[in-house]
Image (cartoon, rainbow, N blue to C red):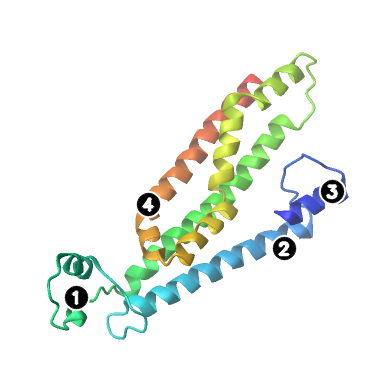
Amino acid sequence: AFDGVVYRSQSGTHLQFQSVRATSGYYVDTTCDALGGVFLCFGILFYLCKRFDPHRQELPTWNKSQEMSVKSGSPTNGQNGSSRETYSKKYLFWKVFCYGLCLACAGKFWDLVVGDFKDIFQVPLKDPNLPVLQNELCHSTTTIVLFCLWRVLEGQALLQYILIPIIIDKIWEFLNYTQYILLIVIVGLYVVCLIYIHHLRTVL
């Protein structure tokens, strides 16, 4: 985000949050963000393969049956290997791919929404009566709520969120809980924004 702050400061476009696609910096920024997400997803996949490989497990794992046996005090007789939690590489790839898809959709949808709002709120209007309405709609509760929701669901934010389960070693649980729900929320928010943008263009 700091690169955007520097660009707006040097170009004299303070508080104008928009994607300037005509510059090389835009493509460098998007390419670096995309590569960062790809490398992160491959790193997660590499870790999960080492943890849940059915043929060769290089990292320790823990499953529900083991946890319940420990809590109940039932002896395992050293048969931990029989209850080892394993998954195929295709299944692990699908889990990570779903989160990568969420990253891509969140980043792209946020960029499109910012462009649409810029074309509505940051352009001069010919009718002298409309700028007042334009300013009111720009500061309306609906607009602010949508902006806040995107700030917590855009691609950069999702990259930060996944660092927490990585640090506390709960990445597998995080992927399971967010596999489909997160994508549904992102797509749903984008659809709501499209409807709202259509309403704004109709009014203005």
Q: Is residue 144 above or below residue 8?
A: above
Labels 2 and 3: the sequence-earlier one: 3
Callout 4 environment at 10 Å: few (<14), some (14 to 19), or many (20+)?
some
Asked whether the residues under the numbered discs 2 and 3 touch, taking CB atoms below 8 Å apart as contact, a structural biologist would say no
Labels 1 and 3: the sequence-earlier one: 3
Q: Is residue 170 above or below residue 11?
A: below
* Residue type, numbered disc 2: Val
Q: Is residue 21 above or below residue 115?
A: below
Residue 124: percent from the left, percent from the top? 80, 27
Q: CA distance from mark 1 to mark 2?
A: 47 Å
Labels 2 and 4: the sequence-earlier one: 2
Labels 3 and 4: the sequence-earlier one: 3
Q: What residue is pinned by disc 2?
A: 28
Q: What residue is pinned by disc 4?
A: 180
* Residue type, numbered disc 3: Ser
Residue 163: percent from the left, percent from the top? 52, 62
Q: Is residue 123 above or below residue 174?
A: above
* Residue type, numbered disc 1: Ser
Q: What residue is pinned by disc 1?
A: 83
